[in-house]
Image (cartoon, rainbow, N blue to C red):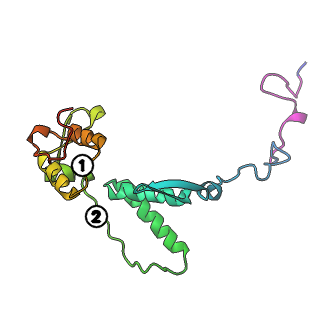
């Protein structure tokens, strides 16, 4: 018995096979199946940020751009490029620039504040080879200069202890008369 319609493994009957030029999904792809990510809903949410010890509410998009800009100014080249691209995109969508800025100039330092602190001799890295224990210690001269700038204001005991522990060689500092935290 030689059957012209062979039926078996990987050979379904001709009547149930897909027709040439006809989709296997007769109803087609459901509409709105792939929805776009709700950027407006997420980035439009209000969040609380803290700047200089003060809290204020901004949109998530603004908070994101502020964070990106801070990283860019600290020397992160990728963040700087991304924030500049975002600024240019925002400018392109607006029909009129109201801020009066015609050019943005960004200077980035090799690796942020760390390279400046080291170059000026303000502080020294305590464990330069160990990335897990990154810690800067202030040089005595910068501590003395900072204490002179305080004028009549005195630091609390906790603040004094923190300054003492952050100073590289605290015994070399000529501490003011009101200073009470010595060697704790």
Q: Is residue 56 visible?
A: yes
Residue at the location (28% across, 33% down)? 133
Residue 101 image-quadrant placement: bottom left
Magenta span: helix, strand or loop, mainly? loop
What is the x, y in percent for residue 122? 16, 50
**Neighbourhood count class around disc 2 (C-alpha, 10 Å): few under 14, some 14–19, many 20 upward:** few
Q: State the residue in front, 115 or 123.
A: 123
Q: The N terminus is located in which quarter?
A: top right
Q: Position of residue 50 (x, y in %)?
A: 46, 54
Where residue 72 appears, as percent x and y from the top left, is 36, 57
* Residue tagged 2: 107
Q: State yes or no: discs 1 and 2 in contact (Cβ < 8 Å).
A: no
In the picture provided, is 70 more to the left or to the right than 47?
Answer: left
Q: CA distance from mark 1 to mark 2?
A: 15 Å
| 31 falls in the magenta region | no
Front-most of 117 and 11? 117
**Which stretch is magenta?**
3-21
Q: Quadrant of residue 47?
A: bottom right
> Which residue is disc 1 drawn over?
114
Q: Earlier in the sequence, mark 1 or mark 2?
A: 2
């Amino acid at each position: 018995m030689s059957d012209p319609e062979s039926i078996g493994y990987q050979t379904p009957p001709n009547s149930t096979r897909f027709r040439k030029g006809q989709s296997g999904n007769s109803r087609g792809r459901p509409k709105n199946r792939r929805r776009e990510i709700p950027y407006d809903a997420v980035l439009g949410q209000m969040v609380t940020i803290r700047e200089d010890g003060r809290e204020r509410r901004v949109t998530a998009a603004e908070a994101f751009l502020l964070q990106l800009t801070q990283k860019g100014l600290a020397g992160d080249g990728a963040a700087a490029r991304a924030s500049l691209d975002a600024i240019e995109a925002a400018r392109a969508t607006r029909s009129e620039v109201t801020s009066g800025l015609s050019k943005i100039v960004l200077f980035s330092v090799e690796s942020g504040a760390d390279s400046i602190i080291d170059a000026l001799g303000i502080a020294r890295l305590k464990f330069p080879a160990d990335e897990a224990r990154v810690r800067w210690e202030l040089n005595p001269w910068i501590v003395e200069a900072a204490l002179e700038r305080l004028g009549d204001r005195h630091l609390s005991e906790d603040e004094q202890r923190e300054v003492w522990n952050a100073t590289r060689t605290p015994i070399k500092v000529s501490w003011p008369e009101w200073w009470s935290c010595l060697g704790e």
